[in-house]
């Protein structure tokens, strides 16, 4: 489902949204508060009749150096609505709430966790995200998906082997799904991707 920053960006565009946090804060509050209520209402019939394994919230709000808004703004505008939405989902038996955001979100990970998010994806390596460091910081409280550097897959050879070997132990610990740190890019040869899959299967003794 679209997240609070993500949907507000759809409504008014990125530049306008970023300026309206300061120029029209009441409007941004109204949009995000409405969106929490809307998501709860439209998902109610689903979660009351189907046991969902997880819910994904699309929230692209970061670039390669950090989030597009400060933690303070997140705490004021978004955190209460995350708590409201995830509280509703948990009351209906949804145990995993995942946020999909590209870029570097280190500065707001604690707030995501406080807001009821317990899974992060795709953990872009080029933006400085590191699943091993996240595991050391959050332990079992935060599930992780991704973080296999697509640049290493494109490079192949020793670079690819090192990347897989470094991250694969997280699978063995649990709470981590190995995956590319975004969409598989066009510069990745099929042979390299096949090698990537083979290495994972070998390390995990699959097939």
Image (cartoon, rainbow, N blue to C red):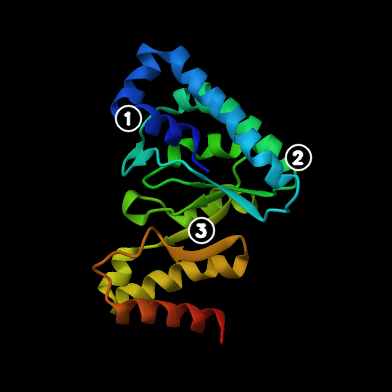
Q: Which of the 4 image quadrants contains residue 193?
A: bottom left
Left or right? Give the position of 6 relative to 206.
Answer: left
Residue 147 vertical placement versus 69 (above, below): below
Viewer-proximal residue, 184 or 132?
184
Marked residue nearer the N-terminal end (3 or 2)? 2
Whole-percent x, y for residue 15 in the image: 29, 27
CA separation in Å, label 3 and label 2? 24 Å
Quadrant the C terminus occupies: bottom right
Q: Which residue is mark 3?
A: 145
Q: Which residue is mark 1?
A: 13
- Element at label 2: helix
Q: What residue is rendered at 51% in x and 25% in y?
A: 32
Q: What residue is rendered at 37% in x and 81% in y?
A: 195
Q: Which of the 4 image quadrants contains residue 206?
A: bottom right
Marked residue nearer the N-terminal end (1 or 3)? 1
Q: Are marks 1 and 2 in contact (CB under 8 Å)?
A: no
């Amino acid at each position: 489902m679209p997240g609070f920053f993500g949907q507000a960006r759809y409504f008014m565009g990125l530049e306008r949204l970023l300026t309206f946090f300061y120029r029209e804060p009441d409007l941004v509050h109204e949009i995000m508060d409405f969106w929490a209520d809307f998501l709860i209402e439209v998902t109610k019939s689903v979660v009351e009749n189907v046991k969902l394994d997880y819910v994904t919230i699309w929230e692209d709000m970061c670039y390669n150096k950090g989030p597009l808004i400060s933690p303070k703004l997140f705490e004021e505008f978004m955190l209460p609505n995350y708590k409201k939405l995830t509280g509703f989902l948990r009351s209906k038996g949804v145990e995993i709430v995942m946020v999909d955001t590209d870029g570097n979100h280190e500065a707001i990970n604690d707030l995501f966790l406080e807001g009821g998010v317990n899974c992060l994806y795709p953990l872009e390596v080029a933006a400085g995200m590191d699943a091993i460091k996240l595991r050391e910081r959050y332990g079992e409280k935060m599930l992780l998906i991704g973080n296999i550097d697509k640049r290493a897959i494109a490079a192949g050879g020793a670079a690819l082997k090192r990347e897989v070997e470094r991250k694969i132990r997280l699978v063995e610990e649990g709470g981590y799904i190995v995956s590319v740190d975004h969409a598989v890019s066009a510069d990745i040869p099929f042979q390299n991707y096949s090698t990537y899959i083979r290495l994972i299967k070998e390390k995990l003794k699959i097939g």
